[in-house]
Image (cartoon, grey):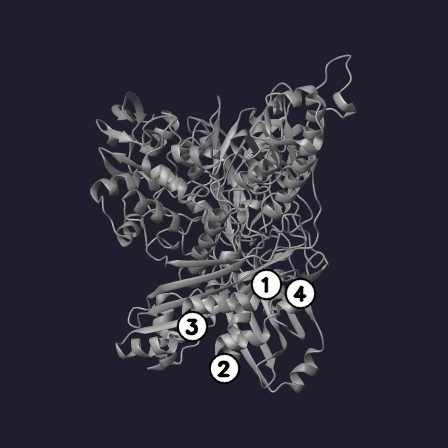
Amino acid sequence: MEESRRISVEVNGVAHQRDVSVRTTLVDFLRHELMLTGTHVGCEHGVCGACTVLVDGRSARSCLMLAVQADGASVTTIEGIAPSPSELHPLQQALREHHGLQCGFCTPGMVTTLVEFLRDCPNPTEHDVRVAISGNLCRCTGYQGIVDAVLKVAGNPAK
Amino acid sequence: MSLIGNSVPRLEDEPLLRGKARFIDDLHMPGLLEAAFVRSPHAHALVRGIGKDAALALKGVHAVLVREDLMPHLRNEFMVVGLPSRDYKQDLNRPALAGDEAVYVGQPVAMVIADNRYIAEDAAALVEVDWEPLPAAADCKAALAAGAPTAHRRSPHNLLAEFPMGYGDVEAAFKSAAHSFKETFWQHRGGSHSIECRGTIAARDPHDERLTVWTSTQMPHAALRVLCDMLGRDEDSIRVVTPDVGGGFGPKLVFYPEDICVALAAIILERPVKWIEDRLEHFVATTQERDQYWDVEVAVNGEGRLLAIRGTLIHDHGAYTARGVNLPYNSAEQIAIGYELPAYRMNVQVALTNKVPVTPVRGAGHPQGVFVMERLLDRVARELRLDRAEVRRRNLVPASKMPYQTGVKNRGGMPVVLDTGDYLHCQEDALQRAGWSGFAQRQEAARKEGRYIGIGVANFVKGTGRGPFETVTVRIGPSGRIMVYTGAAAMGQSTKTMLAQIVADQLGGDMANVTVVAGDTGTVPTGMGGSNSRQAVLAGTSAHSAAVKVRAKLIRVASHLLEAGEGDLEIEGRSVHVKGVREMAVDLGKVASAVAGTAGYSLPGGVSPGLEAMESVVIDPMTYANGTAVAEVEVDIDTGGVRILKMVFVHDCGRILHPMVVDGQLIGGVAHGIGNALYEWMRYDEHGQPLVGTLGDYLLVTATEMPPVELAHHQSPTPLNPLGIKGVGECGVIPIAPAVLSAVEDALTPFNARITRTPMMPADIVGLVRKSA
């Protein structure tokens, strides 16, 4: 019999109370219990960054965190980033304008990572941006469009 | 204003940015079960028995399936290879599950289906397989030696195929040559490592037995064919649907054992079944590119002009034929295109090894051929004391000779004819942008500061748009919405945007009024899918052709409805109106309704029913894109670290459809090429055991390794399709390893370094420095 616990967690501003198996990862809880499938699983060993979400405002690899560890926390996923169904977050808009995504699978983790980064470092250099996303793998873009988008949002467009 | 040539917003972006896209693992359905596979931990072993009891005893486990459980449901146990080759000496198609012999680490031998993946993995660990390990063929060169262990117990040897390629009198050319030089290369290319791994879901409709298979594939129609063949079903009884795909880069064009097993499990258990590959499985069970050994010799005259090249190529094919011999074929063919080469002979040997099968990864064998050619030209330059760019100048196929018939044929037997392009101009542009002519001074100055910088150049010519066709249907229904259906597959390269752009360009220019459905076999009867930088060329051409036909009919019917001459009408947005008189207009939907048929009434203007066209334009000859990369690097001689200071990439893909997308494809390819030059190595030990299994020890390029990339485009439209376009998807990757490693070698000139392999890891570079000390 799998052990389970009741957790209370707020996700994108909505409070949830659920019984979860103690070994369920946070990403599986978000994707398969709450059906928030925007957070993606790329490696399940904490390297690719696709599963990054914000836990109490700090970026976290939801593949390396258990759902029970999120008890009492406030989680923001990609679904909670845009201000409304008709508007994108400025970062999302800039990624679109600068072709910062192709297949888009890494994008949710990039966006959550960068939301935190821009909050902490509102005026980054290009190097700062590259270091900030060096823990997020993208196989499509070569990162250039992502870097350009971040610099644009931060008001420091490259060159 | 034409939409073509403009960076219009991508249709794909909004849902991807909001987390509202639908990738394979995002699909849920009632009653869904999940699968995990029991895989061989040995590179080569006999399976003496499989014990299921402990696994079946676990709560939540629905079944443990082995080969015997599948056989009653299979007409054909084997996945018949996508590109059969007459050169095959052995018939080695992959089975659904291994029977009495497993031939690579990661080969599935049993499948567990459970309530969820957690339980399925618990149970997979409880399946007891009685293994008897056998000697393994690990290295492809060693595998061909006499007395080597055979990759398959029943095989007489490990030579899967052997074929010569070439033309001209090679021996005479070498006899008369002023100089000839020999080189030996080992090249490795790794896996695709799309950030989304593979995945498949199958569901059987209990009412009519129809099977729907959702799969993260580049080739849905090919998947349908294999499913029909293996299950003994007709094409109407299976539908393959491609959800959003999180990157392909080659290996997702293959149909896999897991795909057929998931379909069988859904049939046997009468429940929907899902399997999602994890990253470790991607390392061991998804096809990859791997090793090639080249022994080559080049003959030149006193001016460094090529006279002949000869040699041998040994290619690691892995344990089965998951695809034909196209990879080594492409590699060998690549030597003979781009530069004028009067005589050529390459003997290609394709070796079986106890490793996961090898199939194309972005570039598909071409990067290896380009690496060999560019390294040979660097050698010629060094020996003849010529500038490396000058040797290339003397040998590139000149624009004045276009179209240029090379001496080689493609694998379909058609001569390789370079259609358009000014290769020399591309090179000169790239050299100028990179500051090639002033580099020697910069290098000298840097050395005085104790810094080792170097520069390298590489050219490539790449066949794109492999035919024969892609299918596209364009339809306007009474809603007025323009629907585009295609057998092409979208895996991140903006395929839907590309097709919508081309179609909207003919039909009113409103891309927001276009829906593209790609990769659903229920919507178009035929299709090829995504590979070989082909979709803009083939699907784009069919989309254009279909849209032109729909446009003609739209105008004709609207002319009847508006009682105006066809020449006086134009389509703008979602209606057709009389030029200059916007009030005299009819909606697209009204026009479609008029030809949808009303019982008892004839159709307006005597036209045929419906407002749609399906096109599968056949284009057999490939169109050749080209480009030049110049890399400048700095090498840390103590750590072996290489920093790429600058990358210039001048490229010609004919007429550009969407500049932003083309740039994105190229820069992404450059990143992949840098990985192949410096970082990516799917390493195995001498027993065929993989030594890497995480993205922590198999290094993909991250943002901090990427240099600034200066792109420039030349446009030499091809006459082979009406839009003048060439493919671009693989081009970025192709010349990068030779450009980067030529630059590294240049930086290490004081150490007399010679680079003859990819990848060059820091330890290899430190080794070169120490060797000279």
Mark 3 or mark 2: whose residue is earlier in sequence: 2
Same subunit, labels 1 and 2: the answer reads yes
Q: Is residue A25 left or right of residue B373?
A: left
- Quadrant assignment, res B13: top left
On residue B436, which mark appears?
A: 3
On residue B386, which mark appears?
A: 2
Mark 1 or mark 3: whose residue is earlier in sequence: 1
Chain of the residue under the numbered disc 1 shown in the image: B
Q: CA distance from mark 3 to mark 4?
A: 27 Å
Q: CA distance from mark 1 to mark 2?
A: 27 Å
Q: CA distance from mark 1 to mark 3?
A: 28 Å
Under mark 4, the amino acid is: Met
Viewer-side label of 1, 2: 2
Q: Secondary structure at mark 3?
A: loop
Same subunit, labels 3 and 4: the answer reads yes
Q: Which residue is mark 1?
A: B331
- Please provide percent x and percent y for residue B19: 39, 32
Under mark 3, the amino acid is: Trp
Under mark 2, the amino acid is: Leu
Q: CA distance from mark 4 to mark 2?
A: 27 Å
